[in-house]
Image: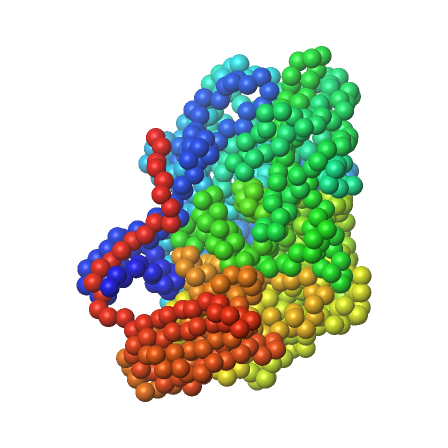
């Protein structure tokens, strides 16, 4: 027989960074090449992104957006050797109030009295996203940190590590071991903490003098600070937001420029694996002084019908020159095909607008156009994600100054309290998952093909929606969801003023909540895949009544000020219908409360929050608001691993005596077991079917992710994914597929049928299928034909006595054969075979 290489998630986590793995059958060593399918396979796009330009020059008269991902030098220090810091941090103590040594509080106190604290110089980077000019930050004189050798032009970095971006310094490990690791299981036991410096030379031609040159960073973890030629340019603390800095005042024209970026990633700053480093793309954007501002367009549609749609456009133009400028703005609309190629002919043109922009100011120009016979954007499989592009051109006396492209889609969204989500008039059941930002073995470093592969597998599952937990994603991920037809809830914060970990976002919330929220919405609001904004997840302010609600009100107002076309919400795992917090939500986004928390008999002995299913109570209190479960299930399992005996309940918490194995850190894959606050898929399905007004769910989670390894915090990754960390399907995949793709002919048997130690013992057999009847055969003998009862979602034969051989199921729907599946007792392995998920050729 053939042995296919399906390494389980646990092995990937324990052996990820060794060069070889042992084949238990042959005793030989094999290279780890199962990760090949995650390598970048983009051809034209990746070539363009990766191609670094050594010289930045005027190739276009209008706008250049150039990747500078290649050719960086990098140095990581576990300590704060350069004595710089964004701000003084509080001491971190353990449960016995002992100071945790790696925070170095004595050093922090020393820094607080010196020029090493750079907060006052970094805050002005936020000004473009603070609406009230009176609240803008004034930059002090000087360039602190410029005397640090790493920021200087003449520093010799030849012995530093050579890297290309995106880069996650932590993923290469090693994992921290033991009971008191430096970085715990919650953050993945990987060395994400530390201070990292990145350096790169930029040669800017003299011909670009008079233009504006911006540094655009899509994501850097975290507390980014940027110097150019020894001068402090600015920075951005929040590691998940994209940001722009103006390099123009600090550039040496016609010469060599030294760019230096410092990141400071503290331990105890996250509940999951954050990664470390410049983990997304970095660009140089060169424009004329009069240009479309950063994320300066906003397009949305109204009055949508089969014959026409009205498209509204707002364009923000910035004048960085010293004189007033009279300009004309014209925008043409083109369609995009499946490969995002622009149509040869324009489909519509917005009326030309003429305006005068004062020196150093910005203006917003609004206009609309009627587009005939619009092709609508909608989720697959019932609709097609059609896309358009608006090409905005700015002129002064007929001379082109700027050209800016905006992709968009035309679609209508209605959030109905009874019918759920309607997209273009069609009710769409939300069949969604939550996704963290890491890519398993690739870490946090964004890789477009790896993200696309995740979405492809989720589409195969029947998933049509993604909730981005709990931070803004890479821009390319939203380009994928637009193109592939996924619905998205885009989320910004996991904490506000009240902390979840000692050094999380609460430390900077007072200064940065507005600029982070505005920049987040402004960057993403043209994506048609985004159906709603989430400005918080399970925040502590749920517990503080009117005080916490006041914070929610501020954030809600900021989101709606930037985009009034979509609902804004925050996910609630505690706030109840009679509390003030839910009043601030446009839609009700519930985590676990809908199906109840610790309310089933198997959970009766557990301590903690306990609620009955709250869908009816929320609907009664808010009859006009749509309800969606933003987190459901939190079912746990280790792929291909089964622990006996098997619970008779449809949902049970993991315990060390039966469902789990704390020594091996396994959780049984019968897909009945959950986190203490969670519920099995079966229980979730039943509760939602009993309350059909609920718009749908986002399962926790689509893929396993690094960190947060509930319930075994001495492990390294989560157990909650429908798909494991390496991209292999758990049995649960087929349970969700049977519900989310009811017309798909599929049957799936579990467990495997290799149990030499269980001969003569009860070994339950479960089958997942969209069929309504099934008959199970063991070595040709029928073990009975079963029907699904009301609120049942699997077939169960819980008294099967194991004997080796063949296990076969035949399923039926409406009396007709639907699908079958067979598992057999395996013989000795004879051959190892590797199969790539696609073929491609590398371009040089």
Q: Quadrant of the C terminus?
A: top left
Relative vertical location of residue 209 with respect to residue 266 in this rendering, above or below: above
The residue shown at (75%, 36%) is 308
Horizontal and vertical percent position of residue 208 = 55, 17
- Name the side, left or right, on which 479 lies relative to 422: left
For the image, the number of numbered tags is 0
The residue shown at (61%, 76%) is 791
- Name the side, left or right, on which 136 lies relative to 205: right
Horizontal and vertical percent position of residue 156 = 37, 31
Relative vertical location of residue 440 with respect to residue 260 in this rendering, above or below: below
Please tell me which residue lies in front, 352 or 191: 352
Image quadrant assignment for residue 346: top right
- Does residue 592 show up? yes
- Name the side, left or right, on which 557 lies relative to 405: right
Relative vertical location of residue 679 with respect to residue 155 in this rendering, above or below: below
Colour pattern of the rendering: rainbow
The residue shown at (22%, 65%) is 829
Relative vertical location of residue 368 with respect to residue 210 in this rendering, above or below: below
Horizontal and vertical percent position of residue 497 = 67, 57
- Name the side, left or right, on which 459 lies relative to 139: left
The residue shown at (26%, 61%) is 2
Horizontal and vertical percent position of residue 216 = 56, 34
Image quadrant assignment for residue 289: top right
């Amino acid at each position: 027989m053939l042995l296919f290489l399906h390494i389980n998630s646990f092995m990937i986590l324990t052996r990820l960074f060794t060069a070889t793995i042992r084949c238990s059958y042959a005793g030989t060593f094999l290279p780890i090449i199962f990760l090949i399918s995650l390598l970048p396979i983009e051809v034209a796009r990746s070539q363009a992104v990766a191609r670094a330009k050594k010289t930045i020059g005027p190739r276009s008269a209008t706008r250049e957006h150039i990747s500078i991902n290649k050719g960086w030098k990098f140095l990581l220090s576990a300590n704060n050797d350069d004595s710089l810091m964004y701000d003084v941090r509080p001491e971190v103590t353990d449960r016995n109030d002992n100071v945790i040594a790696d925070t170095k509080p004595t050093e922090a106190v020393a820094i607080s009295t010196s020029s090493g604290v750079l907060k006052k110089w970094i805050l002005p980077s936020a000004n473009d996203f603070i609406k009230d000019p009176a609240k803008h930050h004034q930059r002090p004189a000087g360039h602190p940190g410029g005397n640090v050798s790493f920021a200087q032009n003449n520093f010799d970095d030849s012995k530093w590590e050579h890297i290309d971006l995106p880069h996650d310094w932590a993923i290469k490990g090693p994992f921290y071991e033991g009971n008191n690791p430096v970085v715990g299981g919650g953050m993945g036991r990987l060395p994400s903490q530390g201070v990292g410096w990145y350096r790169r030379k930029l040669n800017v031609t003299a011909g670009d003098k008079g233009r504006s040159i911006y540094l655009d960073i899509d994501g850097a973890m975290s507390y980014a600070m940027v110097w150019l030629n020894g001068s402090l340019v600015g920075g951005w603390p929040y590691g998940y937001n994209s940001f722009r800095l103006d390099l123009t005042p600090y550039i040496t024209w016609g010469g060599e420029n030294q760019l230096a970026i410092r990141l400071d990633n503290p331990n105890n700053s996250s509940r999951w694996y954050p990664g470390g480093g410049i983990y997304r793309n970095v660009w140089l954007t060169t424009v004329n002084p009069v240009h479309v501002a950063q994320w300066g367009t906003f397009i949305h549609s109204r009055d949508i019908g089969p014959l026409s749609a009205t498209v509204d456009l707002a364009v923000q133009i910035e004048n960085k020159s010293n004189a007033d400028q009279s300009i004309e703005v014209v925008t043409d609309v083109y369609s995009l095909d499946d490969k995002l190629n622009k149509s040869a002919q324009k489909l519509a043109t917005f009326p030309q607008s003429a305006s005068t922009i004062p020196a150093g100011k910005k203006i917003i120009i609004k206009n609309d156009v009627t587009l005939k016979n619009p092709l609508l954007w909608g989720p697959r499989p019932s609709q097609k994600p059609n896309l358009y592009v608006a090409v905005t051109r700015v002129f002064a006396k007929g001379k082109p100054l700027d050209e800016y492209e905006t992709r968009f889609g035309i679609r209508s969204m209605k959030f109905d309290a009874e019918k759920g989500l309607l997209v273009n008039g069609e009710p769409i059941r939300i069949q969604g998952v939550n996704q963290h930002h890491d890519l398993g073995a690739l870490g946090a470093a964004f890789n477009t093909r790896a993200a696309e592969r995740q979405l492809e597998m989720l589409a195969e599952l029947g998933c049509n929606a993604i909730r981005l937990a709990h931070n803004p994603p890479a821009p390319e991920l939203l380009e994928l969801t637009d193109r592939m037809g996924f619905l998205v809830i885009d989320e910004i914060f996991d904490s506000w003023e009240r902390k979840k970990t000692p050094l999380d976002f609460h430390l900077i919330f007072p200064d940065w909540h507005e600029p982070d929220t505005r920049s987040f919405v402004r960057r993403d609001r043209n994506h048609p895949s985004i159906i709603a904004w989430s400005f918080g997840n399970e925040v502590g302010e749920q517990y503080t009544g009117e005080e916490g609600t006041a914070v929610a009100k501020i954030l809600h107002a900021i989101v709606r000020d930037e985009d009034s076309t979509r609902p804004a919400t925050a996910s609630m795992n505690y706030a109840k219908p009679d509390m003030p917090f839910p009043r601030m939500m446009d839609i009700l986004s519930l985590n676990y409360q809908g199906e109840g928390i610790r309310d089933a008999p198997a959970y009766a002995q557990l301590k903690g929050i306990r609620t009955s299913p709250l869908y009816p109570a929320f609907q009664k209190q808010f009859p006009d608001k749509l309800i969606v479960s933003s987190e459901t299930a939190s079912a746990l399992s280790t792929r291909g691993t089964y622990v006996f005996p098997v619970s008779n309940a449809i949902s049970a918490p993991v315990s060390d005596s039966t469902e789990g194995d704390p020594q091996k850190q396994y959780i049984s894959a019968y897909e009945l077991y959950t986190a203490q606050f969670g519920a099995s898929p079966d229980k979730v399905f039943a509760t939602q079917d009993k309350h059909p007004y609920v718009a749908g769910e986002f399962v926790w989670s689509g893929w396993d992710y690094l960190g947060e390894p509930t319930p075994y915090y001495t492990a390294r990754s989560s157990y909650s994914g429908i798909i494991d960390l390496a991209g292999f399907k758990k049995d649960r995949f087929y349970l969700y597929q049977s519900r989310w793709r009811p017309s798909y002919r599929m049957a799936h048997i579990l467990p495997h049928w290799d149990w030499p130690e269980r001969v003569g013992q009860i070994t339950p057999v479960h089958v997942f299928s969209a069929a309504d009847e099934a008959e199970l055969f063991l070595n040709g003998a029928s073990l009975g034909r079963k029907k699904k009862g009301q609120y049942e979602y699997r077939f169960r034969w819980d008294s099967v006595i194991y004997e080796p051989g063949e296990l076969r199921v035949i399923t039926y729907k409406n009396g007709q054969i639907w699908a079958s599946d067979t598992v057999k007792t395996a013989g000795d392995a004879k051959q190892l075979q590797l199969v790539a998920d696609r073929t491609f050729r590398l371009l040089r």
